[in-house]
């Protein structure tokens, strides 16, 4: 014996859930679930973890050497150039923006990793998510600016900090 429910029944249940949560789509329902601790951070950030897997898979040791030399050997590199990283941002960041929540665990994970491309991912993620920053995020941003600090990430994060301060003049 198999249990069967029709597609119409599923759609009715989903519509009822969305109405009870007072949200208009599944993405908003996921955000609601996260904000009300109905799901954990790990379920919420799987998409961004896939980005890191793809970044690692794209490593190119032949490009890594010249990238390290350009940065005066301050950091190790995977050898994933900006155009390839930008493709990953375009693939993953729009979905992340739908959540309207900054995944600081993801940012911290990227910042702790050695190859510099991970800090680029984190900084560009924050740039994409900057409209969702809160005034309480300023100390976190400051920590990033002064940790593994070099002109490349500071140039990205200055816009993020600037946007936050512009949106919250009391800072």
Image (cartoon, rainbow, N blue to C red):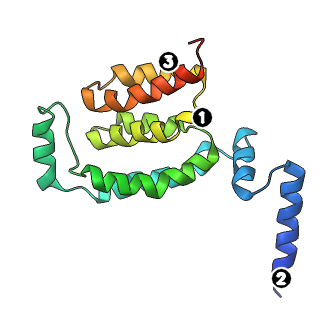
Q: Mark 3 highlights which residue? A: 139
N-term-proximal mark, 3 vs 1 = 1
The CA distance from mark 1 to mark 2 is: 42 Å
Residue at 34% across, 37% down: 119
77 lies above or below 160 = below
N-term-proximal mark, 1 vs 2 = 2
- Label drawn at residue 57: none
The CA distance from mark 2 to mark 3 is: 52 Å
Residue mark closest to the camera, 1 vs 2: 1
- Label drawn at residue 4: 2
- The answer to whether residue 46 of the structure is visible from this angle is no
Tell me residue 135's x, y (percent): 59, 20
Q: Quadrant of the N terminus?
A: bottom right
Relative to 106, 148 lies left or right: left
Depth check: 87 or 105 in front?
A: 87
Residue at 60% across, 26% down: 134
Bin the neighbour count of mark 3 within 10 Å (Cα to Cα): few under 14, some 14-19, many 20 and up: few
Q: Mark 1 highlights which residue? A: 132
Residue at 90% across, 52% down: 20
């Amino acid at each position: 014996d198999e249990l069967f429910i029709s597609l119409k029944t599923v759609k009715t249940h989903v519509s009822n859930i969305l109405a009870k949560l007072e949200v208009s789509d599944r993405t908003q329902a996921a955000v609601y679930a996260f904000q009300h601790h109905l799901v954990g951070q790990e379920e919420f950030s799987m998409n961004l973890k896939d980005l890191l897997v793809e970044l690692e898979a794209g490593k190119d040791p032949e490009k890594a050497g010249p990238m390290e030399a350009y940065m005066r050997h301050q950091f190790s590199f995977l050898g994933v150039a900006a155009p390839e990283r930008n493709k990953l941002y375009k693939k993953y960041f729009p979905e992340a923006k739908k959540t309207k929540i900054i995944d600081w665990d993801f940012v911290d994970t990227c910042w702790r990793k050695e190859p510099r491309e991970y800090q680029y991912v984190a900084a560009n993620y924050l740039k994409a998510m900057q409209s969702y920053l809160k005034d309480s995020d300023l100390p976190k941003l400051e920590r990033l600016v002064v940790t593994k600090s070099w002109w490349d990430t500071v140039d990205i994060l200055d816009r993020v900090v600037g946007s936050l301060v512009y949106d919250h003049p009391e800072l």
